Amino acid sequence: MADDLTGRHALVTGAASGIGLRCARALHGAGARVTLLDISEEAVSGHAAELGGRAQAFAADVTDEARVEEAVRAATGAFGPLHVAVNSAGSGTFGSVTDLPVSEWRRVLDLNLTGVFLSVKHEARAMADGGSIINIASLNARQPAMGFAAYCASKAGVEMLTKVAAMDLGARGIRVNAIAPGLVDTPLTAGIKGSELEEEYRDNIPLGRTGTPDDIAPVVLFLASAASGWMSGDLLLVDGGAHTMRYPRLAK
C-alpha cells in the first residue's frame, strides 16, 4: 500500500485536538510510530495512551526554540530519526488593521509562522534523508478575509516558508509541502457552528459543506507516503472548492 508507514517515525504538532489529532491517529493507523506534540501535556499524553505502544507525547510551546529542540531530541531518542513531520499548531484572531492590538498580531504571527519555522528547523535536523514535512496552512494563505490580517499574513508566510524549505532541504531528498484547508469543524471554529456565518461559508463552498479533520488526514497520508515522492514546495488546497468563490464577509 502506498500509505503504509510501518517502521516510520512521524511527529505531529498541535496534536491535542482537531486536525493535528486526527492526523496523528491516521499516521498511527498507517503503521507509523507517532510523537504527539502540543502545549497541553495532559491532553496529548491521554491521546498517546489511547493509541498505545507506538505513540508517545511531549509538551512543547512551538514558539519556544529551546523547548522545541528539546522535545524533538527526546522524541528521536525514543523512536529514532524522523521520517514525517506534520506542523498543525496554530491559532487566529479577529480585528480590523486599524484596531488590532500589536500584541495580538505578534501572538498569531509567532505561533502560526515562527512556530512552523522553528518546528521545521529542528525536525529537519532530526529527519532521515528522504523524509516528508507537511505544514498546515490555510485557504487564507491565498484568499484574504476582512478582519483576518494577522491570520492571513501568517498563513501566506507558511506557504512561502514551505517553498523555501523545499529548496533548502531538497538535496537531502526531504520533501516539504503544505495543505491549505478551508473551513474545518474543529474546536477553533466551534464558535460559528449553527450560525448565519457558517451558512454563508457553506454557500461559498461548491461541494456544499464545511470540512472535517477526516477530510485533511488522507491528504497528509498521501504527502507522507511514496505516492507523492516527486512533490515538494507545493500548497494543496483542500477546501471543497471554496477558493473558486468569494470569502464570506466577516466584518459588517
Image (cartoon, helix red, strand yellow):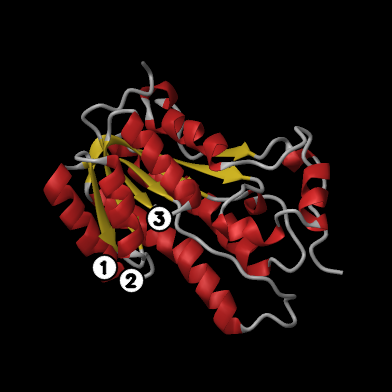
Query: 213 left or right of 139?
Result: left
Tell me what residue is drawn at x 82 percent, y 68 percent: 251
Q: Are marks 1 and 2 in contact (CB under 8 Å)?
A: yes
For label 3, the SS is loop
Residue 52 lies in quadrant: top left
User: Tag 2: Cα neighbours inside 10 Å, few (<14), some, or many (≥20)?
Assistant: some
Query: 21 left or right of 84?
Result: right
The amino acid pointed to by label 1 is: Arg
Of the image marks 2 and 3, the number of the one nearer the N terminus = 3
For label 1, the SS is helix
Residue 103 seen from this side: yes
Residue 35 seen from this side: no
C-alpha gap between disc 3 and disc 1: 17 Å
In the depicted structure, whether residue 53 falls above or below residue 154: above
For label 2, the SS is loop
C-alpha gap between disc 1 and disc 2: 5 Å
Residue pointed to by mark 2:
64
Q: Looking at this view, name the residue that lies furthest to the top.
A: 1
Residue pointed to by mark 3:
16
Q: Where is residue 160 drawn, in percent x and y?
A: 53, 52
In the depicted structure, whether residue 232 falls above or below residue 183: above
Of the image marks 3 and 1, the number of the one nearer the N terminus = 3
Front-most of residues 131 and 87:
87
Front-most of residues 29 and 165:
29
Q: Give the foreground label among 2 and 3.
A: 3
Residue pointed to by mark 1:
67
Q: Where is residue 126 drawn, in percent x and y?
A: 22, 49
Q: Where is residue 141 drawn, in percent x and y?
A: 63, 52
Query: 59 left or right of 221?
Result: left
